[in-house]
């Protein structure tokens, strides 16, 4: 059969940065210590293409995905990022003309959580991973750059509207100025907040993604829960109003907490954070993001 | 050319309830009195198909849409629902084998709104319309059933968590029991709320959709706005906390308000309402819906 | 603590058809014979509400979901619809003021498939289920109405454009009129097609959902596959062009095949089918749908 | 009133790359020569934030958007990117603490097109624009980097499956080897394709976006149309099968065509292209992308 892909391009010639598949869904079995999780993963995989070839052998991408995923049914992988890493290496092996392979994955992740031991339920989070394999110059060894991340939905309460309401209500209810009421949490707008963090893992280092999720939830005004009886609801609302946060605060507090959560990660570790609050008082969202390194985060603040 | 559509079905024969197009986008010019609005409309159009024909002449659906839409560039239509009505009639004319034609439309609608005259900005709403044309028995006249609707995003504040927080805070701050603080709005969770209402218009009746939007916003704890300076934010938060609402309250209050908003609509008018609160303390949504008639809504409450 | 939900409505009084949760995600373990599948399910659950109560006890909805889902980790359920059925019954038990409970579920479902034994891979489908529980009049027994469904993505090739192209090409290439070329499949537009079917299960009857998926794929021009080597691709394209189908054909052929696939289902069984072709030659979709009964489908065609 | 945003951060201090609004919708009036188009634009706007401030004055973002958008009702802007540019400059003016402002916009764009003069209809495209304003060092002048882009939905037909089918059919129909049938277009899979291109505009240069859309459509196997009568459908299918394209071909041919379409753009002009084919024979998509410069594109191919 004629191999059209291996022929030279019929028209314009140009190398291409990336050719691959997207939106391909696969069930991946991951061993998270406590239990095997079957993650329904959305993959995006690609390799580069030299100017001399008309097409990339895309059926190999689907084969590699199938093989790695199938193997996990019998032998679960340790993490989503290690699966991405194995896929990226294998893509380079099967596309001998490519110099780079890129794998991105996202998956829903259920964790049992609750406000108290008798209010446990599965809460859903998102796991994120990426692996980029590069062929060494002159036939050298393949190097793989891994990124691990997570997204959690929680709650933010606005510190600014809280102060505005405090002043407005104090004008209407002078009794609010009673010193015995100092520190009383005041009304404000609060809303669903989605925060994600992605850590570029240096070679030889790993990261516990459950801890990443905890770091996100601690940086929000409050985590949120599926099961809340009347008293629990009050406690979550109170907690959130005692920790009012702008999106700016969520990003800063999350970043600042990472070195303590992951003390063994080296200074060169890069981290990307972004947060979105689905404002209750607006029809649009409010966002903040930052990219920095563990070295920056470990630097003592200027006096 | 062979007309495959007009041939009998090659395999199984069955009449079909509905065959048509969906996800087709068109710019429709609507004259709203104040100004001509160009609505970017998503249409779904269909007709039924008798057992004797293999296919529906779908290119006629696209032609009818193009003609009606093109005509509005020169002569704007009065409303989205009147455009749907014209399209539904014309579909029946061009599909002589069909007995029914169905047209559904939704469009984003920008209205200048604001907390005060100097804080005006475009707020976005959704217009909804449907028209179903039926051929009369024995070649009788075509009758058209029209539905008009709207969706607005606003805010709800939870009345239950407010009372729970009031009790919890009163235990911690006994000074809150000061009678001078009676009626003080307390903290609770609040969130983005989407509410829609669809009214089946009886023959010969019209409905002002801006009034429908107002009715929705009055039924929520508060409307929301693009531009809110610090003081405005406080006022919107205060207003919402003074009108705490369950999703149940939003649906009931909206329904109850309709006869006063539209006194000329007859008792037989049917109405469908649904509301979704994107709960700030949960990762899931809370919903309520109801379908009733103006006759029911006008009935005095049981003692 | 004050129970706001149990109080009478503060404003308008009206019974409500439906109050509940939507967009809640849970991992449900289903035993499909071959193996236990962990389905990531999106649930929507609701009950009705009498005019006398201000609110529905929504935390009970989340509790019921958590309990049923948790139990499946140890003891998998037989099907998504039986889980829905159990949830609907339990909702009525925990909402004594409600007369009806409604549960809707959809879940991604991975099945190993392939063009040949050595090209197997997981293909993704959608499972659909619904259960509606009604309290009997006068405290009578609860009855549950179950619906089971599935959606599959496949391919359709247009029979009309095929004939138009045949005529156009025959004019350009008279050699095409060679009788030795009779039946040669000709070029046409082909595209992704999503088809779903929902069956209302009569009491005491079950339905194998894998068979429903097979029925859908047989009604499309061809199923589609993740792994296709060069020769396989040609065969799938050829198969699809030998079975060109309008959306009308997909719906009719699928419906017609159901009585043979499910001979034990009684005449009263109702079935809903819809199909969407994401047309390659248009920016919009083409759709068809029908609702009928097994009695109709078993009726011999009129002569 | 206390200005919480201007206070120093309560917790962690870190500069932030980006704080702003997303998902905000506005109707922008653009003068496209032929007529004024009202574009429904989705904006995302942000500025950076120094370590010394707790919050960004987000209400100013909404005010700037409202002012620019309102002004276009009376005096339409020339293009989406010039509106983005004006917004980015004004954001820097209103956020004196910021060094950069970023504005991203996307909007649906309707153009009358058709296979022939009497088959005209509105086809929908997407306009894309971005402007990034940077404050010069030492209080120097603000510089603005503009990006202009578009996305068009068209059709691709696979060249590889076409050859595989040619060989398979020739084996079955030896008469196909008749030299009089050389060049006969053969069956293959074809599908919806979305292609986008983004051009970084050097200072003092403009770009006609309608021409960008034409360049995209010429690089696909065929454009697609809302209105196609039977004969038209055949012609579009034939055209697409006479220009079969991999995603790789679409990207390369599009890039190669740009210097001829925009001869006055300088060598330093950077361009980003990506394309997605929603494969009819797979449930997933196939993608290709590349980033290069006009200098590279103008370089004569290596011999």
Image: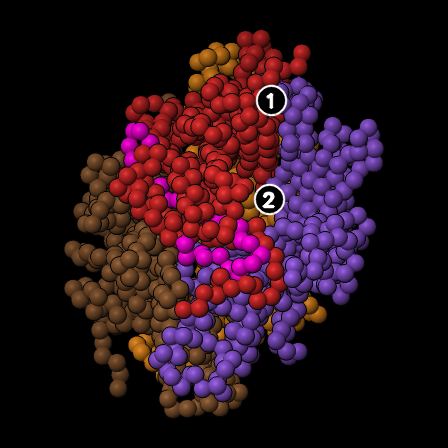
Chain colours: A purple, B brown, C orange, D red
Q: Is residue D262 magenta?
A: no
Q: Quadrant of the N terminus of chain B?
A: top left
Q: Is residue D164 left or right of residue D186?
A: right
Marks 1 and 2, how far apart at CA: 31 Å
Eye-nearest disc, 1 or 2: 1
Q: Quadrant of the C terminus of chain B?
A: bottom left
Task: State the image coordinates of residue D124 (x, y, percent, origin top left).
Answer: 39, 36
- Residue B156 drawn above or below residue B161: above
Q: Nearer the viewer, residue A281 or C215?
A: A281
Task: State the image coordinates of residue B232 (x, y, percent, origin top left).
Answer: 36, 65
Q: Nearer the viewer, residue C222 or B222?
A: B222
State the residue lying farthest toward the front.
Answer: D138
Q: Is residue D293 left or right of residue D93?
A: right
For mark 1, give the secondary structure.
helix
Residue to which mark 2 is pinned = A23
The disc label shown at residue D296, or none:
1
Task: State the image coordinates of residue A241 (x, y, percent, origin top left).
Answer: 52, 73
């Amino acid at each position: 059969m004629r191999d059209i892909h291996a022929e030279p391009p019929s028209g314009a010639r140009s190398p291409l940065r990336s050719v691959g598949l997207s939106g391909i869904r696969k069930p991946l079995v991951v061993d998270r210590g406590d239990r095997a999780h079957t993650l329904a993963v959305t993959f995006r995989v690609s390799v580069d293409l030299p100017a001399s070839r008309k097409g990339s052998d895309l059926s190999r991408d689907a084969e590699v995905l199938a093989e790695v995923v199938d193997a996990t049914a019998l032998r679960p992988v340790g993490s989503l990022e290690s699966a991405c890493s194995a896929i990226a290496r294998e893509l380079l092996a099967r596309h001998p003309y490519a110099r780079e392979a890129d794998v991105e994955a996202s998956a829903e992740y259920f964790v049992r959580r609750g406000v108290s031991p008798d209010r446990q339920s599965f809460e859903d989070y998102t796991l994120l991973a990426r692996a980029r394999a590069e062929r060494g110059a002159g036939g050298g060894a393949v190097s793989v750059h891994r990124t691990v991340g997570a997204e959690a939905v929680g709650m933010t309460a606005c510190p600014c509207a809280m102060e505005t309401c405090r002043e407005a209500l104090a004008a209407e209810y002078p009794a609010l100025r009673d010193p015995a009421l100092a520190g009383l949490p005041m009304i404000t707008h609060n809303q669903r907040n989605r925060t994600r963090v992605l850590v570029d893992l240096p070679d030889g280092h790993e990261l516990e993604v459950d801890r990443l999720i905890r770091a996100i939830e601690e940086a929000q005004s409050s985590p949120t829960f599926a099961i809340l009886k009347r008293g629990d609801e009050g406690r979550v609302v109170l907690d959130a109003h005692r920790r009012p946060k702008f999106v700016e605060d969520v990003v800063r507090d999350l970043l600042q907490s990472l070195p303590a959560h992951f003390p063994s990660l080296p200074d060169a570790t890069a981290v990307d954070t972004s947060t979105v609050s689905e404002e209750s008082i607006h029809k649009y969202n409010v966002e903040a993001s930052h990219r920095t390194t563990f070295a920056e985060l470990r630097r003592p603040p200027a006096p």
